[in-house]
């Protein structure tokens, strides 16, 4: 019937406890989606409370991105509760910065396991319900560092460049099933992570931005929400850079 209300779209956002992930979860909810805000332990509870206070719908979920079973349980549990999965945003990520000559293998392995392998497991699990529906939106968060490199971040750059290649390959695999796969690559964004950078390094980064200012988590969230929307139905395999012109 034409008067029937369409069910809310269901979106999973990883790393949703703070920064870019929190902003993405808030904006998806503001645009009418039911958001599964995922983070370690109970860290996403504050995000869910903020969404609820604004009149949106959300639930908190616990996930450990380096634990395959935990990631798969996040997806399967969401589908069991809601019978669908429309949007997945792979945002969870870590840094373990060090010059390569001094970098410990554990720092390499942990960054790759979280940022790249975590994206792989999340997307693989999400494909099953999306293929059944013949519809889905996958958006992964990369970084300007994955496009241009940065001294002291070989592990992070490799993981984020890997996300881009992974998503381009996946986009080709699932396009015939009406599933789009895209990447948002933020530049220098004001978050807890970037605030820990030494002030001199912050100034060096800011000097490379033609627009003359750092970005905000809301800037990134707007790009993600566009790629997750119906308006982006003919866009797949693309990298949307949100960097103020830092890398062109």
Image (cartoon, helix red, strand yellow):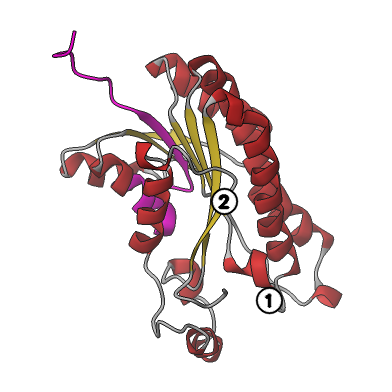
Q: Nearer the viewer, residue 199 or 91?
A: 91
In this rendering, which labeled residue sits more in front, label 2 or label 1?
2
Residue 152: quadrant of the picture: bottom right
* Residue positioned 41% across, 77% down in the render: 214
Measure the C-alpha gap from mark 2 to mark 1.
Answer: 22 Å
- Image check: 214 left or right of 118? left
Residue in view at x 86 percent, y 76 percent: 101
Left/right placement of residue 99 relative to residue 9 reads right
Residue 86 position, x and y percent, is: 43, 28
| Vertical order, 114 against 192 (above or below) | above
Residue 4 magenta: yes
Where is residue 186? Give x, y as percent: 50, 64
The magenta-colored residue range is 1-26
115 sits to left or right of 1: right
The answer, for residue 79, to whether it is visible in the render is yes
Query: Quick one: label 1, few (<14), some, or many (20+) residues within 10 Å?
Result: few
Residue 17 in view: no
Q: Is the residue 4 above or below the residue 173 in the image?
A: above
* Residue pointed to by mark 2: 238
The spot of residue 61 in percent (x, y) is 43, 34
Disc 2 crowd rating (10 Å Cα; few below 14, some 14-19, many 20+) is some
Task: Give the image quarter of residue 177.
Answer: top right
**Residue 237 lies in what quarter of the image?**
top right
Closer to us: 25 or 226: 226
Q: Looking at the image, is 220 positioned above or below residue 148?
A: above
Q: Nearer the viewer, residue 143 or 61?
A: 143
The residue that label 1 is drawn on is 150
């Amino acid at each position: 019937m034409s008067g029937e209300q369409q069910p809310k779209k269901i979106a999973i956002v990883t790393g949703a406890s703070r920064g870019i992930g929190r902003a993405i979860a808030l904006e998806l909810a503001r645009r009418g989606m039911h958001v599964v805000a995922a983070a370690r332990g109970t860290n996403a509870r504050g995000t869910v409370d903020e969404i609820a206070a604004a009149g949106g719908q959300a639930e908190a979920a616990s996930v450990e991105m380096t634990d395959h079973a935990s990631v798969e349980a996040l997806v399967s549990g969401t589908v069991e509760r809601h019978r669908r999965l429309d949007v997945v945003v792979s945002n969870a990520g870590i840094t373990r910065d060090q010059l390569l000559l001094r970098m410990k293998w554990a720092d390499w392995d942990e960054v790759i396991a979280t940022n790249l392998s975590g994206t792989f497991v999340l997307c693989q699990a999400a494909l099953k319900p999306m293929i059944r529906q013949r519809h889905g939106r996958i958006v992964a968060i990369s970084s300007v560092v994955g496009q241009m490199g940065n001294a002291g971040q070989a592990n992070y750059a490799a993981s984020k460049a890997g996300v881009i290649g992974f998503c381009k390959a996946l986009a080709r695999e699932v396009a015939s099933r009406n599933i789009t796969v895209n990447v948002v690559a933020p530049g220098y964004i004001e978050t807890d992570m970037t605030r820990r950078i030494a002030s001199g390094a912050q100034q060096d980064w800011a000097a490379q931005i033609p627009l003359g200012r750092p970005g905000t988590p809301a800037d990134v969230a707007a790009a993600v929400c566009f790629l997750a929307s119906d308006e982006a139905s003919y866009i797949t395999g693309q990298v949307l850079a949100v960097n103020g012109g830092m890398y062109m």
